[in-house]
Image (cartoon, coloured by chain):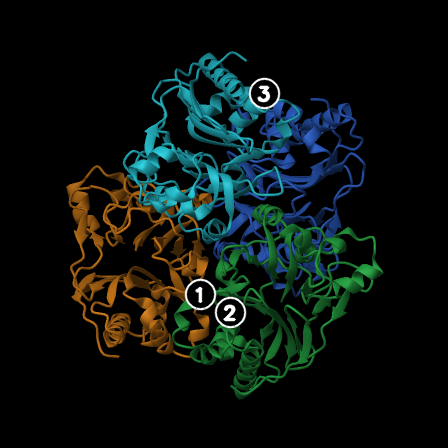
Chain colours: A orange, B cyan, C green, D blue
Amino acid sequence: MCRWLAYSGTPVLLETILYRPEHSLIDQSLHSKMGVETTNGDGFGVGWYGPGTDTPAVVREIGPAWSNRNLREIAGHVRSPLFFAHIRASTGTAVQQTNSHPFRHGRWMWMHNGAITDFHLIRRDLALAVDPELFPDIEGSTDSETMFFLALTLGLEEDPPGAVARMAGLVERTGHSHGVEFPLQMTIAVTDGERLWAFRYSSQGTSRSLFYSTQVETLRSLHPDMEFLREVSDETRLIVSEPLGDLPGAWNRVPESTYGVVQPGVDEIVHFAPQAA
Amino acid sequence: MCRWLAYSGTPVLLETILYRPEHSLIDQSLHSKMGVETTNGDGFGVGWYGPGTDTPAVVREIGPAWSNRNLREIAGHVRSPLFFAHIRASTGTAVQQTNSHPFRHGRWMWMHNGAITDFHLIRRDLALAVDPELFPDIEGSTDSETMFFLALTLGLEEDPPGAVARMAGLVERTGHSHGVEFPLQMTIAVTDGERLWAFRYSSQGTSRSLFYSTQVETLRSLHPDMEFLREVSDETRLIVSEPLGDLPGAWNRVPESTYGVVQPGVDEIVHFAPQAA
Amino acid sequence: MCRWLAYSGTPVLLETILYRPEHSLIDQSLHSKMGVETTNGDGFGVGWYGPGTDTPAVVREIGPAWSNRNLREIAGHVRSPLFFAHIRASTGTAVQQTNSHPFRHGRWMWMHNGAITDFHLIRRDLALAVDPELFPDIEGSTDSETMFFLALTLGLEEDPPGAVARMAGLVERTGHSHGVEFPLQMTIAVTDGERLWAFRYSSQGTSRSLFYSTQVETLRSLHPDMEFLREVSDETRLIVSEPLGDLPGAWNRVPESTYGVVQPGVDEIVHFAPQAA
Amino acid sequence: MCRWLAYSGTPVLLETILYRPEHSLIDQSLHSKMGVETTNGDGFGVGWYGPGTDTPAVVREIGPAWSNRNLREIAGHVRSPLFFAHIRASTGTAVQQTNSHPFRHGRWMWMHNGAITDFHLIRRDLALAVDPELFPDIEGSTDSETMFFLALTLGLEEDPPGAVARMAGLVERTGHSHGVEFPLQMTIAVTDGERLWAFRYSSQGTSRSLFYSTQVETLRSLHPDMEFLREVSDETRLIVSEPLGDLPGAWNRVPESTYGVVQPGVDEIVHFAPQAA
């Protein structure tokens, strides 16, 4: 299990979000409150979009985030309007760079918290379902990366919610056919650099925690003296595995079996259900 | 703060002690119960004596012990009658191999849990007190390594308890002269490959926890069905930062301001007090 | 491309073979003379059999061997009658522990120098040919690991030369069907802890270099004053990507399209040709 | 011994300089032509100034630059008007992050190629000469970092050329007093984020190679069709351990015993000689 964070809005130094909050993602790497594991020290990653290229930069490492000096350097000097950060708690899979999130394909980024139950039983069947053109690009051994490649295979670049629904459907069918009762547990963030989708779903209906931040406009009226809120645009939004602090009114639980879209204009929360591929 | 373990006795596979106990040192790296920090993921080390050489092998790494496959491989294939293991929780000092314990000099090994208070204030004074012949061998930046080099300077190889007492005295005097009220907090293990000394002391009299295992003979009568106890000699002894499990009668607290000696014949526990150098 | 070394014979400290020779494997990691690349700094591994277990210890890392202190420690303290060592020069595949050699399955070890040409084109087809029971154990992304899993699938544990021949046949057929003219380039070492097989083959007939050491008895008469030769048994044998020094008469080229067996009794060199699976 | 590169001028993506040239620093990490060692694989670092902060970001690692994916990501997404890059070939000192260059103090960066001869003999004397206020910030064990701290002690922030001259004088005097004939070998780059100084000096008068790029204006007239030259300002300048390619007229040897200043207005090359402190 893992913890993640997705930011979209006014360009900020990454450290503003990654290090400064009281219960920041870095703090969660040592002391997660809502995770299955309190420690998330088996690798981390950060991916950001910057000016002059559509493709995000993705920096991934194998040690804990809390002691990594390079992450601190990058976070203190890179500014971005849209970035992902992820801290990993391995459930046995190798701790290696290619198993750290986020994963990237072209201008798309993907990160995941959760697991495919008994992944070893169905890893091969799922791998076979990956588009043969994409298959050779699989570099790691996680369920999360396989899910990304399945979503890409099933149309992620054209229809993200549909592709994720078809991926989830495929995982569930494949799991069921191997006798796995509840095959899927996931919170997922995916982006193309412009819009950001976040999914919360599990076969059993007991999904890992996921929260989104309240509209900045509303937060400003609740907390008129918070400087940070005056500096960011109305469209700034955070989606996180667990709240970054205790600010009253700031955090809202993403409902079970839904996904949200952060986009220019009005954000949305929509029902999510796995689909046939 | 850190956790450590010292074993002396019948040669065993390292994993017997490092991995198999319910609350093993590896478990403590994720879930320490008595440490200042619950997570000890900032490097680790293991040092062992084997046949055919006086000098111990010392393997040190920078990541967490819990996910390190090479440690598991070594522990599953190396057998030793005397070994140290240490897991580190940095309090800010760089996470690097030369800051991981145990430290070695010739056939001597040293490891430490605790801290010199406000070490940055007195680091230079302590460094100057190191024998100029030894000074160039300092490779890291920890208080623990400096303490080892001071003890070597002050006669560790001839009189370990005296040298550690003089080192502690020097640290306290230097700290006091810089206005530090309680300069020293330490549990230390040191060995020459034959005898093993363990120290528990702090300026404030609130030292980090330290335990030694009950005599095997006594344990056998308490737990006649424990296979492991039948396989090891009467002289087998463990000293640990915290107990490796809940076996009734197995663990005894090392008293404040004492040191113990594990050696052929009768082990000893003796009062410890810092001395003038 | 890579360099490797396999030792079988009188138990020795690993460093005797890994570090002491003039042109040792460690020296080859910086200055290979016969390799496609002069530098082999993209990870390394060592695997050894010891007393008390059938399964070898396998320690693998991601940095260069030449600067790795832990390898030096292990090599200076571990003694083994049968061990493999490998230094890697990646041709683009991720530098990660699971891509370092040797690979292990139960008591079997495998290491490889060479490449499957255009591996990305046929990686999926080869992966599908792996026994579904074994598939989930694939952890890395190299051609070398896939070759090992194919050989296991095709009977390695019962008939090593036959399984390797069938693996080579499968790789060649699959490559040809994708328009690859010369699909395979390999020198391979494989062992079950008792016998050791070494293969030299390439589709084009221009295989990477491979050498075996002259019989100890013969070497002794050539070099009566070499201490090392007096200490090892007549059955001691080394197989290496390139000679460890210039000792006259010591090294013999393994012929193209052959494999050798190091075993109790008489060693053999036999013609090798890929087979239908 | 090492290789380094310093860039000052029109903001560019780091990869433009670090990866794209034919004989880039990354290529030099595997195949240095003019270095004492052909391989520089014992760590690397990059430090850059960006908008919104005086302090440079410094990312340092312990493995080879050539295979490091994070360096490639950063170089492909970070743009800077002034940056340093360094690849290290250790001469025995530990391969650890705190021994990688560049070193930073406030807004100053420092990197070095060369060595203090018999550093272990005089390391303590030099350490004692470091300002006691600065001493606790020494984190590594290299001669290069000690030289930086000595220069800071001797006035680097007020008078860089004078401070480096006094540092060199101190190193030479200390070396001579320990019987070292030629104590110093150095090429050094230092910057405060606005100006950039580069020094070439050795006690023996046989300094490591150092080159500066020809004025852009001149280069443009020599190579009117080179796109890169049309995109950068007249004041753009590179200083490098060895040329990044074979462009005729592009590279000029920094003379023995001189230093250069890259600054707004006219750059300078001035005679350099060690001074009394």
Comparing C79 with A60, the one in front is C79
Q: Choose mark 2 or mark 3, whichever is in front.
A: 3
- The residue that appears at 21% across and 64% down in the rendered structure is A202
| Chain ID at mark 2 | C
**Residue A108 placement (x, y as % from top left):** 37, 66
Q: Compute the Cα span from label 2 to label 3.
A: 53 Å
Find out whether the residues at labels 2 and 1 contact each other: C-beta distance under 8 Å: yes
Question: What is the secondary structure assignment of the residue under circle 2?
Answer: helix
The amino acid beneath tag 3 is Gly
Give B81 or A31, whichever is nearer the viewer.
B81
Provide residue D268's location: percent of width, then percent of height: 70, 39
Per the image, the residue denoted by label 3 is B155
State the SS at label 1.
Answer: loop
Task: Return the chain for callout 1.
Answer: C
State the quadrant of the N terminus of chain B. Answer: top left
D35 versus D184 height, above or below: below
Name the spot of residue C171 as percent of width and height, x first: 54, 81
Q: CA distance from mark 2 to mark 1?
A: 8 Å
Tell me if residue B113 can be seen.
Answer: yes
Q: Give the labeled residue for mark 1.
A: C139
At label 1, which amino acid type do we have?
Glu
Q: Quadrant for residue D271, please give it.
A: top right
Q: Chain of mark 3?
A: B
Going from N to C along the chain, the mark reached first, 2 or 1, is 1
Nearest to viewer (mark 3 / mark 1): 3
Q: Is residue C117 above or below residue A80?
A: below
- Label 3 CA crowd tier, 10 Å (few <14, some 14–19, many 20+): some
Residue C145 is labelled as 2
